[in-house]
Amino acid sequence: MITLEAPAWFRRLMLAFATALVGLALALGVFLWRLSTLFQVDGDQRAAAMFLLLGTLMTLQGMVIVGLAWLIVAVSRVVLRHDAAGLTLEHPWRRWHGDAVAVRQAWQHGPWLVLEIDGEWRRWYVWAKEQHAALEQFRGLLPAGAWLEGREKRRHLARTVLPPVLAAIGAAGLLGVWLLSRTGAN
């Protein structure tokens, strides 16, 4: 049986960090809500629009922070198990079970074992720091060519990570140019 998971101290630390993030987001929201009660927008449509924009941005900011906190807790609690029943990957909100031959690509990135599974569009990140024996056992279960190192790993990451990043940069640039053209027109 193979088991890879983060140590208890790391899980507690990430839970405390995520709780602090959510607490800060709530504190910022309450502060801005209290601050907004000092201003009056009686008939000023521009001021009302600014408050609506501020409220929308604060809601989005809160959603992003809660999402990041959720991600931090989830990633810190991923457990990989392999036994006679097969390979199981799970954290509190997600589970996958199958055979080790379903692992399309796997590599180690810092303390993390990164897994891409056939039929799954999200990657799994498993804490593997200082678990060398279990990691070597797991590598032995993988199909030929699934473990990536060196040039193959860099090529795979460039092929899968770079296009969405470049697309996001391009979209942000186009949005910036459009906003600048709209501002210059007025």
Image (spheres, rainbow, N blue to C red):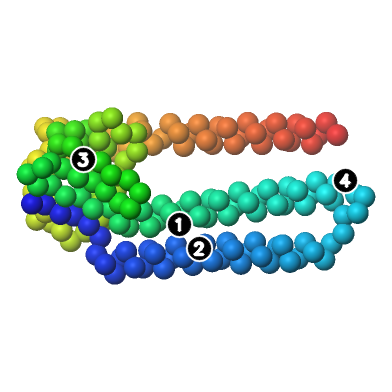
How far apart are the alpha carbons under marks 4 and 3? Answer: 55 Å
Q: Residue at x 58, y 54 (%)?
A: 62
Q: Identify the image quadrant of residue 170.
A: top right
Q: Is residue 137 left or right of residue 68?
A: left
- Identify which residue, 180 or 23, lies in the foreground: 23
Residue bearing mark 1: 69
The percent position of residue 72, horizontal first and vertical second, equals: 40, 56
The residue that appears at 81% across and 34% down in the rendered structure is: 184
In the rendered structure, which disc, 4 or 1, sits on the residue that comes first in sequence? 4
Q: Nearer the viewer, mark 4 or mark 3?
A: 3
Residue at which label 2 appears? 21
Q: Amino acid at mark 1?
A: Ala
For label 3, count other residues whose C-alpha is less than 10 Å away and answer few (under 14), some (14-19) or many (20+).
some
Would residue 179 be visible to someone looking at this image? yes
The percent position of residue 164, horizontal first and vertical second, equals 45, 33
The residue type indicated by label 3 comes to: His
**19 and 133: which one is in front?**
19
Pointer 3: what residue? 97
| Picture quarter with the C terminus | top right
- Rendered location of residue 85, percent (x, y): 10, 42
Quarter-wise, where is residue 150 in the image?
top left
Q: Is residue 110 visible?
A: no
Task: Identify the mark nearer the N-term, 4 or 3.
Answer: 4
What secondary structure is marked by label 1?
helix
Element assignment for label 4: helix
Task: Tell me the kind of residue under disc 2.
Answer: Leu
- Residue picked out by circle 4: 45
